[in-house]
Image (cartoon, helix red, strand yellow):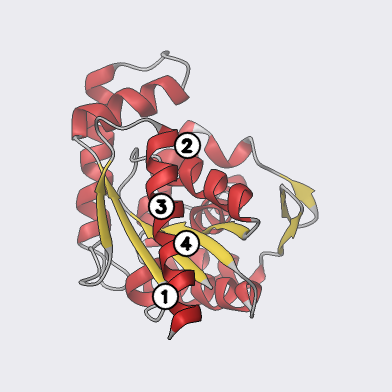
């Protein structure tokens, strides 16, 4: 079974997807890490966003592997580096390059294979896994999303700047030529603004169980 969870930044996708995967014993995969890894490597090599071909070459050359909870980039765990302010500022533009999206999507499909998986991103239910058995679209009020992202950063940033960054990311994600952020017509919409992580997880797991029961009875 594929559980595809999409939605904009700050809606709790990563936390919820990881928790749901743990509780259902499904494999968890965060598509955003792949784009962050490519962005981090390109920046570390001094490649700028103004050179798409250099970024595409980085995507083709990079070695990404999963080792349990560790995300290895060219054989080294880079989890912390992938969430630096520089990567945060550049990843939306890198992920908007069609050739890079195709390369990442192909890797995700190979990793998913035939296993039960919870995968989250921006276009998991619309492009990568259009036939996913369970599709969820998470959303939340922009101010709440900014507060969550501010908490993730330790409260060191300015709220207005974080909110502006989220709005910019949304604008880029919704305007992508390939894999733009949109809700699949058959996805379950969940507004997480006034819900706790546990409450959202309960709703998603109930949807998975209902799908499993329906599948066994049909």
The residue carrying pointer 1 sits among few (fewer than 14), some (14 to 19) or many (20 or more) residues within 10 Å by Cα, namely: few
Q: Quadrant of residue 64?
A: bottom right
Alpha-carbon span between mark 1 and mark 4: 8 Å
Q: Secondary structure at mark 4?
A: helix
Q: Name the residue at the front extreme.
A: 217
Q: Position of residue 202 (x, y in %)?
A: 43, 44
Tag in front: 2 or 1: 1
Residue 39, given in percent of the width and then of the height, sits at 52, 52
The circle on residue 209 is 4
Q: CA distance from mark 2 to mark 3?
A: 33 Å
Q: Position of residue 157 (x, y in %)?
A: 37, 17
Q: Kindly identify which residue carries mark 2.
A: 86
Measure the alpha-carbon separation of dots 2 and 1: 46 Å
Q: Residue at point 25% right, 69% down?
A: 184
Of discs 3 and 1, which sits in the foreground? 1
| Residue position for label 3 | 204
* Element under disc 1: helix
For this rendering, which residue is in front, 64 or 217?
Answer: 217
Question: What residue is pinned by disc 1?
Answer: 214
Looking at the picture, how far across and down is residue 111, in whole percent? Answer: 65, 72
Tag in front: 2 or 3: 3
Alpha carbon distance from label 4 to label 2: 40 Å
Where, by quadrant of the figure, is residue 188 drawn?
Answer: bottom left
């Amino acid at each position: 079974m594929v559980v595809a969870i999409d939605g904009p930044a700050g809606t709790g996708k990563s936390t919820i997807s990881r928790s749901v995967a743990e509780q259902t014993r499904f494999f968890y995969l965060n598509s955003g890490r792949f784009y962050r890894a490519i962005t981090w490597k390109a920046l570390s090599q001094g490649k700028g966003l103004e050179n798409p071909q250099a970024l595409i070459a980085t995507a083709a050359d990079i070695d990404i592997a999963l080792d349990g909870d560790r995300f290895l980039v060219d054989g080294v765990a880079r989890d912390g580096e992938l969430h630096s302010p520089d990567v945060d500022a550049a990843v939306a533009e890198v992920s908007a390059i069609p050739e890079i999206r195709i390369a990442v999507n192909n890797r995700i499909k190979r990793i998913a294979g035939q296993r039960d998986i919870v995968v989250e991103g921006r276009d998991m239910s619309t492009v990568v896994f259009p036939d996913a058995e369970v599709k969820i679209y998470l959303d939340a009020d922009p101010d709440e999303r900014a507060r969550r992202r501010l908490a993730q950063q330790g409260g060191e940033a300015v709220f207005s700047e974080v909110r502006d960054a989220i709005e910019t990311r949304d604008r880029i994600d919704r305007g992508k030529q390939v894999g733009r952020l949109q809700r699949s017509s058959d996805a379950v919409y969940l507004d997480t603004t006034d819900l706790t992580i546990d409450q959202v997880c309960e709703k998603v797991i109930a949807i998975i169980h209902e799908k499993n029961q329906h599948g066994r009875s049909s």
